[in-house]
Image: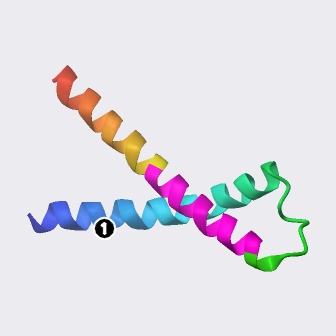
Amino acid sequence: MIKKIAQEFLWLIFSVLAAIPLSFLFLSCIEMVESSNEIVIIEFFIAGIIINVMGIYLVRIIVASVKKISE
């Protein structure tokens, strides 16, 4: 049980670390980086991090379910 919790914690850290650069990519794609309103940029950056973490976990769940089905 402790091993599973540690594994999920490591996945959470990996997801957040991977989501930060992906959020910069997200902001540059919608060209918000050059905007003068810093509050809007921060809001989009946080939204990008949340969306990317959810996406990484979704892909992880899909891969785990495919592995489980193929066993």
Q: Kindly identify the amino acid type of the residue bearing the numbered disc 1.
A: Phe
**Which residues fall within the magenta stretch?**
40-54
Position of residue 10 in the picture relative to residue 33 (left or right): left
The residue drawn where x is 59% and y is 63% is 47
Few, some or many C-alpha atoms within 10 Å of disc 1 (few <14, some 14-19, many ≥20)?
Answer: few
The residue drawn where x is 54% and y is 53% is 52
- The spot of residue 50 in percent (x, y) is 51, 61
47 shown above or below 68: below
The residue drawn where x is 46% and y is 59% is 15
Q: Looking at the magenta stretch, what is its main secondary structure?
A: helix
Splitting the image into 4 quarters, where does residue 45 fall? bottom right
- Magenta highlight on residue 53: yes
Residue extending furthest toward the top? 70
Splitting the image into 4 quarters, where does residue 70 fall? top left
Give the residue number, with chain letter if any, for mark 1: 9
The residue drawn where x is 36% and y is 59% is 11
Residue extending furthest toward the left? 1
61 shown above or below 41: above
* The N terminus - image quarter: bottom left
